[in-house]
Image (spheres, rainbow, N blue to C red):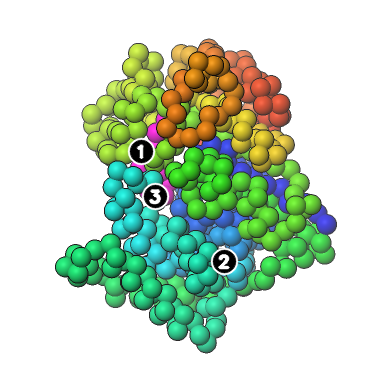
Amino acid sequence: MTRVDVLLGLQWGDEGKGKIVDELAPNYDIVARFQGGGNAGHTIEFDGKKFVLHLIPSGIFYPHVTNFIGNGVVFDLIAFHKECKDLMTHGFSLNDILRRIVISGKAHITFPTHLHLDAVSEKFLGAKKIGSTKKGITPTYTDKIARRGIRIAELHSPQFMQKFDALTQEHIRIFRSYWTEEEFDEYIQHSDRKTEMLELFAAIDFVKQFTFVDEYWLNEQLLYASKKVLAEGAQGTKLDIEFGDYPFVTSSHTTISGVLSGLAIPASAIGEVIGVFKAYGTRVGMGPFPTEFGGKESDIWCATQSREIELSEYPNASPNDANDFIKGIALRTAGFEFGATTGRLRRCGRLDLPQLKFACMINGVTKLVMTKADVLSIFDTVDICTDYRYDGMVTKQIPFGNDVQIEPIYQTFPGWNVELGATTLPDELKSYSDFIEYTLGIPMFLVSTGPDRTQTIKL
């Protein structure tokens, strides 16, 4: 049996995994998504074009690669249809897409009512909201666990419409519980249910053209065909339903355990585990972020403001300002830190090594990839959090609980203040990279120095 190499995010998502999968994909026969759904946003740039993939694995741009959507993924039919149509506007034929994508018949379907439930439940949480992407992820996984979900293979079942109607009625029942009758009627009047249904059934007809496979398929590719497989993670370790900053997490297993259950492979099939992290920290939505520039002020700002307002009010934010809040805005602008899926402002901060070490430990990371090193070129000095001060003690352990007060302890490095090339690292960036590598005890494999395919340095 050949092995499955795994690529995972080590922070709160948005680490640049899509670019790295695209970089590595030529070396593999299959790229496989194992969890998450339309809440993923993997950005890939080459030949002056920019693509944002949500459900389609990032190996799609290579003709020899089969892109597998595993059973652990929640599958938004309409979003997938739109994503495929977007590829077809960029030169893909329908036959290209049908040939390059294979879907697990056991992947659960996200319907429009899942998106409505997600949006309204987040709204009614008010101050306790978790920062959902409102892509229907939690309601779809809820239906899966409650054993009333509908799986991809059932699109071909004679009982599909019966099950779909029953699930829709259950969603309406839940939806009504959030509203008075007057509020519910008003919401329905402003909903374009007819358009949704037309889009849904057009998407169903489209998706039924694809090859649906069972849980044996990937194992057979490994065992009998000796295929090389790269598993592509979505979101990041600190958003994992078990090991993330609960409850400010996603609804799936974003860590190594999700690979096994989401692709139906044994633990013995795991090969290299490639951990991707950004040279600094970012987070979208609510939840703890100890090294955030500007702390609570930044948290509130990012939750309530738009990119347009920020650029209007702070057009000349300096990365070397004495005010940490301003530094965060400068970093967000330079790094284009706006959600690929939602457009929301990403909270920005310094690199957190205790968090990173935890992520490497639970995932069994064997290689590191650092992205967006070029963005930090704007700083005169760069800080890394090496420890926390908590309850009067210095510790490298992450204190339990989201409301504990911890003070990050930083080590300062000189900035590199140069435009990065695609072959070698400047001495200052090499020192930064070496310190991370030494502290984590894991070799650095790649450093990304820009968004394009060509801007990657192999160490």
Q: CA distance from mark 2 to mark 3?
A: 21 Å
Q: Which residue is mark 2?
A: 107
Q: Which residue is mark 3?
A: 132
* Amino acid tagged 1: Leu
- Report whether 176 appears left or right of 227: left
Task: Please tell me which residue lies in front, 203 or 215.
Answer: 215
Question: What's the magenta bit mostly, secondary-structure-wise?
Answer: loop
Residue numbers of the magenta segment: 338-348
Label whose residue precedes the other's in the sequence (2 or 3): 2
Please identify the residue farthest to the front as the structure is shown.
Answer: 391
Q: Secondary structure at mark 3?
A: loop
Q: Residues within 10 Å of mark 3 (few under 14, many from 20)?
A: many
**Point 54% across, 37% down: residue:** 11
Q: Which residue is mark 1?
A: 345
Task: Please tell me which residue lies in front, 167 or 227.
Answer: 167
Residue 137 part of the magenta-drawn span: no
Q: Secondary structure at mark 1?
A: loop
Asked where in the image residue 19 lies, by quadrant, the reply is top right
Residue 66 pos. (x, y %) = 66, 61
Label whose residue precedes the other's in the sequence (1 or 3): 3
**Residue 80 in view of the camera:** no
The answer to whether 242 is drawn above or below residue 392 in the figure is below
Q: Secondary structure at mark 2?
A: loop
